[in-house]
Image (tube, rainbow, N blue to C red):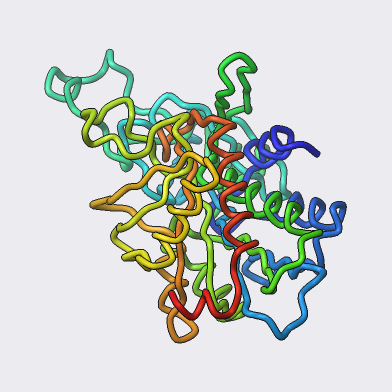
Amino acid sequence: MDSLKLIETLSNAYGACGFEDEVVKIAENYATDEKLGAVRHDCNLNVYINAGKNTGKNPVVMLDAHSDEVSFIVQAVKPDGTLRFLPQGGWSPYSVPAHKVKVQTYSGGWVSGIVACTPVHFLSAKERGACPAFEDMVIDIGAVSKEEVEKIFDIHIGAPVVPDVTFEYNEVTGVMLGKAFDNRLGCAAVLEAMKALKEESLETDIVGVLSTQEEVGERGAFVTRDVVKPDIAICFEGCPADDTFAPDYMIQTALKKGPMLRHYDCSMITNPRFQRFSLELGKKLGIPVQESVRAGGGTNGGAIHISNGGVPVIVIGVPVRYIHSHHGFACIADYENSVKLAVEIVKNLNSELIKSF
């Protein structure tokens, strides 16, 4: 499976927070087909891939990405057959209404719905100029009663809801359009980096991890970090691109400018020695790399770097426009350079270097 097909398969998969089953299956099948090593998942749906050449005696490098996507969950069924819902992850209410979604049935199927709010014809002048709150929105699946929702559509409270978007690729521009690039691009990067490293002679042991529920507080990473006990880690992310709205001097995550390495966000001050090593290696090898300092946001790096007595962690982010909405744009070259940089970093790691960080 080539990179684009892997990304397409992962992007189209439905994986709401806590319901990442489809992504788990794709990752496990890929790891098995490519003979990446021993693969398993835990009860929280975190996936662990222990590279086939691991000795158990070398420093452990953790390659991490989260498998969930920003999503919703059904909170209640109204008498008129519409669904009240809660957001999972950092949604802006401006980007939610009028979009198509898929709602999972109790038996595991999927039903199409639309995020709806009061039509413009019935809004007051004041309401027309205001953004609706989540409690003013519903998901309409075409039902007319609560009984119909439960008995005919087989939908109950607690059902996961995901954006209904199909992956597209523009061969001329090299730009991808799809959902869940945060963080299915990272999931693909973990798998492809492990594939690229499979035949390398390394001085480290590699464990690839796809962790769950990052969008609701890095919950999966708090488990995986304690299971893997890494000595060093690379977190792959889909990161918010700022090149369509920020002034030129503030653009730090642009499409087609390479992966972004983040110095700072609300969850982690990146280990400066590991960060500098990675930036300089990218420059030496001619791999385009961007740098950022963010006032908000957070990644699994926040959970991982304060585990196992302290772990040097960097975040390699693929720029994604309009992240945390139904649709995103990302460049395949930025993804490929993210994988390439991570592979080169791992190839250069050894016990002495890791201790110097």
Q: Residue at x 49, y 74 (%)?
A: 222
Residue 332, by quadrant, is top right
Q: Position of residue 340 (x, y in %)?
A: 61, 47
**Can residue 61 be spotted in the picture?**
yes
Q: Residue furthest left?
A: 126
**Which quadrant would the N terminus be assigned to in this image?**
top right
Image side of residue 330 versus residue 30, left or right:
left
Rendered view: 18 above or below 141: below
**Can residue 70 be spotted in the picture?**
no
Q: Residue at x 33, y 57 (%)?
A: 263
* Nearer-the-camera pick, 64 or 144: 64
Rendered view: 138 above or below 297: above
Q: Position of residue 177 (x, y in %)?
A: 55, 26
Q: Residue at x 52, y 27 (%)?
A: 100
**Which quadrant would the C terminus be assigned to in this image?**
bottom left
Counting every numbered tag in the picture gives 0
Rendered view: 111 above or below 266: above
* Nearer-the-camera pick, 61 or 216: 61
Q: Residue furthest front?
A: 284
Rendered view: 296 above or below 354: above
Residue 290, by quadrant, is top left
Image side of residue 130 versus residue 335, left or right:
left
Q: Position of residue 190 (x, y in %)?
A: 64, 54
Q: Residue at x 30, y 57 (%)?
A: 265
Image side of residue 62 versus residue 262, left or right:
right
Q: Position of residue 126 (x, y in %)?
A: 12, 23
